Amino acid sequence: MNLVFDVISPQKEKVDEIVLSEAVFGVPVKGHLLHETVRWQRARRRRGTASTKGRSEVSGGGRKPWRQKGTGRARAGSNRSPLWRHGGISHGPKPRDWSFQIPKVPRRGALRSALSAKAAAREVCIVEDLTMDRPNTKTFQGILQGLGVTGKVLVVTSQREEAVEKSARNLPRVKVLPARGINVSDVLEADAILFTREALVKVEEALTP
């Protein structure tokens, strides 16, 4: 796999070449790890607050609707039975925690697989630096267009860049993350990943086995 990428300036001028780490961007893509890790991420995001009331929780239903025998109707002990209108819900959802655990080693392996897939598809772009004096969405959008990154873009900076984050906030297909926040779901969903050189170094240091 060719892991040699150009390092470009925000004006799309080539300033250097860099060889991506084989241990991070050149590993075999393991689909089962990617699947399990995305499931884990989505489960952790579920609020789990859906709730319904059972027959003992709905209001009313304290009196037997009619006598047991002699009416010709079915026996009934409460008008809040799940069979009745306005009755309780049978086996309805209750607040719960949907999350489950995955060990750290497979999670990092999944992230290496995701990055390797993007590198193989040449969907990785490396910029020398990406800092802004103040937030400006139009300027930031112009930088991305000048760099030639289109579609859904994941921008990875070395640390939190408030001006960059605020500039991208109004761009629905652009997401900005610091290097420590990079994750499998966002990598797989992106059409292009834009690293700053310093962010790339941090990602490689964190993911090298």
Image: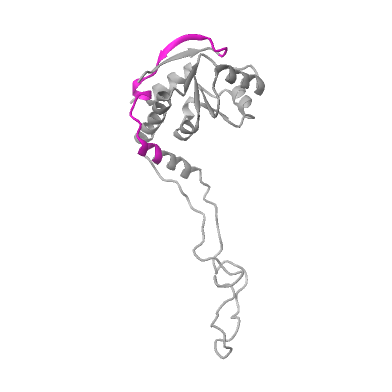
Rendered location of residue 140, percent (x, y): 62, 21
Q: Nearer the viewer, residue 144 or 91?
A: 144
Rendered location of residue 208, percent (x, y): 35, 24
Locate the C terminus by quadrant.
Answer: top left
Tell me if residue 19 comes above or below residue 104 in the rendering: above
Residue 96 visible in the current orientation: yes
Q: Nearer the viewer, residue 34 or 60?
A: 34
Q: Residue at x 48, y 30 (%)?
A: 181
Q: Is residue 56 magenta?
A: no
Tell me if residue 207 comes above or below residue 128 in the rendering: below
Q: Quadrant of residue 130?
A: top right
Residue 103 visible in the current orientation: no
Instruction: Identify the image's colour scheme: rainbow, by chain, secondary structure or one colour.
Output: one colour
Q: Quadrant of residue 169?
A: top right
Rendered location of residue 99, percent (x, y): 45, 46
Q: Which residue extends farthest bottom?
A: 70
Q: Residue at x 47, y 30 (%)?
A: 187
Q: Quadrant of residue 143?
A: top right
Report the number of numbered marks.
Answer: 0
Stretch in magenta? 10-35
Rendered location of residue 146, percent (x, y): 58, 16
- Left or right side of 85 for 128: left
Tell me if residue 83 comes above or below residue 7 in the rendering: below
